[in-house]
Amino acid sequence: MRRGNALDMVVEAVSVMEFDGSYDAGKGSVLNLFGEVEQDAGIMFGKDLSVGAVAAVRHVINTIRLARLVMEKTDHVLIVGDGAEELAKQFNLWVPSTELINENKINRYNSLIRSLRTRYERNTELARRFSLMGTVGAVALDRDGNLAAATSTGGTILKWPGRVGDSPLPGAGYWAENGVCAVSATGIGEFIIRAMASLRVANLVRDGVSIGDAVRQVVDYVTKLFGPGNIGLIAIDKVGNVASAFNTEVMGRAWSREDMGRVVIAHFAADQFP
Ligand code: ASP
């Protein structure tokens, strides 16, 4: 936070989580129906509404950095599959599959696939529970008033190959707009896309709703439409108010400010946040 701008902050925060391996992003990305990793990520800078995103990327750990490259080094917003892999190779972000797929993941995949054949219903439930909270995201405000948002994911476990979720889609998985707010989403991408959840939060804030009320209202709206257990949001407004809301049991989240000298971490809805 002492160097760089809001964009650098969200990239650094998401990169740490992509490298960690315990989230459904980067190294920890879950496997799709064919036992492969396919990641989506998107980033947005509120100063000029610039956006960069990638989808169905198979050989990258720092997928958010690849999204940033799309934003800063190409004329495009979203690059998928082989084209994204080629870009990763040119900027030294490409890694072999062995860096992303380990024995644990293969065992979990095999047991899910086995149970799929006999108990489809229960397995779907299980897959949901495993994959729901894994996506990583960050939002930030810098001293110049710039807002930024970044979201990175391995997607939902056992997804159809080529399936793209909300995380690389601006307005759905993230949004950042100076003078308004920055938002990042997690949950079941199909619902988040249909609700345009992140842009919906920004629209409410632009109309004068507080950031806390806005994220709550959008989560309630999604719950009403599609039921519980499918969305979580983090957000920050133009003056640095931080908020989160979710309709799942748990959502890990943390926040800090330059003058605080510490990071506040929360998991359950009842935990104090911010
Ligand atoms: N939103 C992500 C997706 O649907 C998954 C997640 O948040 O865990 O791809």
Image (tube, rainbow, N blue to C red):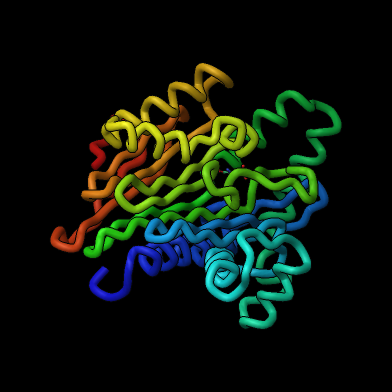
Q: Is residue 33 visible?
A: yes
* Left-right relation of 69 to 96: left
Quarter of the displayed picture in which ligand 1 can be seen: top right
Tell me if residue 36 comes above or below residue 166 in the rendering: below
* Left-right relation of 203 to 222: left
- x, y percentage for residue 167? 57, 49
- x, y percentage for residue 176? 41, 51
- Pick the residue in front: 111 or 23: 23
Tell me if residue 116 comes above or below residue 261 in the rendering: above
* Left-right relation of 216 to 42: left
Quarter-of-image position of residue 156: top right
- Pick the residue in front: 233 or 132: 233
Q: Is residue 102 visible?
A: no
Quarter of the image that includes the C terminus: top left
Query: Which residue is drawn at the image coordinates 66% and 75% (left, top)?
Result: 88
Query: Which residue is drawn at the image coordinates 59% and 63% (left, top)?
Result: 27
- Pick the residue in front: 232 or 128: 232
Quarter-of-image position of residue 42: bottom right
Query: Which residue is drawn at the image coordinates 79% and 49% (left, top)?
Result: 161
Query: Which residue is drawn at the image coordinates 76% and 57% (left, top)?
Result: 36
* Left-right relation of 161 to 134: right
How many discs mark residues in the rendered view?
0
Tell me if residue 233 comes above or below residue 15 in the rendering: above
Residue sitting at the far right? 117
- x, y percentage for residue 105? 68, 55
Residue sitting at the far left? 259
- x, y percentage for residue 26? 58, 62
Tell me if residue 233 comes above or below residue 255 in the rendering: above
Quarter of the image that includes the N terminus: bottom left
